[in-house]
Amino acid sequence: MKILGCVAAVASKVKEIIGNLITTAGKVVVTILLGLTGIILPSLTSAVYFFVFLFLCTWWSFCRTFDTLIFSCMCVLMAIFSAGHLVVLYLYQFQFFHEFIHPEDSYIRLDTGKNFLSFFLFK
């Protein structure tokens, strides 16, 4: 019985360590993806991703930690923002939106970049 108690204690500690490792790895992957999203195609909307990335890296560089709930809320807010960004890109592919907002308009250039739209939509 004593051996089973030791095995159970070791198993619970290993489970805790692996759980913490997975949580930390998830935070690192999310942070790297935010940085890549903000860097790959510079635009006004990508700046949001880039500044969140800079904030997270700066916060962690001061050896501070985030509560799991706060980090999860930030991930949900970024997912909502990303969904809105994708919806705008998909809607802009309809002819009605091309007539309503011309590709040379400053809003479109700030949102997605003129080169991106001309390469993918107008060839």
Image (spheres, rainbow, N blue to C red):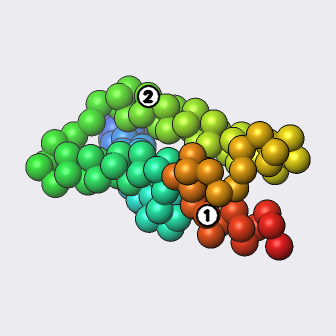
Of the image marks 1 and 2, the number of the one nearer the N terminus: 2
What's the residue at 77%, 40% (across, down)?
Answer: 100
Q: Is 91 or 11 nearer to us in this picture?
A: 91
**Total marks drawn?**
2
Residue 15 falls in image quadrant: top left
Question: Distance between the Cα atoms at labels 1 and 2?
Answer: 32 Å
Q: Residue 16 appears in which quarter of the rendering?
A: top left
20 lies left or right of 112: left
Q: Quadrant of the C terminus?
A: bottom right
Q: Amino acid under label 2?
A: Cys
Residue drawn at point x = 64 percent, y = 38 percent: 83
Kind of element beneath mark 2: helix
User: Is residue 96 at least partly visible in the picture?
Assistant: yes
Whole-percent x and y of residue 66? 27, 36
Q: Disc 1 marks which residue?
A: 114
Q: Which quadrant holds the N terminus?
A: top left
Which labelled disc corresponds to residue 89?
none
Name the quadrant containing residue 50.
bottom left
Observer-nearest residue: 99 or 82?
99
Residue linked to disc 2: 73
Compared to 87, does 34 lie above or below? below
- Percent position (x, y) of residue 47? 41, 51
In the visual, does 76 lie left or right of 15? right
Residue at horizontal 29%, vertical 30%?
Answer: 67
Q: Nearer the viewer, residue 29 or 54?
A: 54
Write the residue at 51% across / 32% down.
Answer: 76
Type of amino acid under label 1 = Lys
Foreground disc of the pair 1, 2: 1
Q: Residue furthest left?
A: 62
Does residue 16 appear to the left or right of 119 in the view shown? left
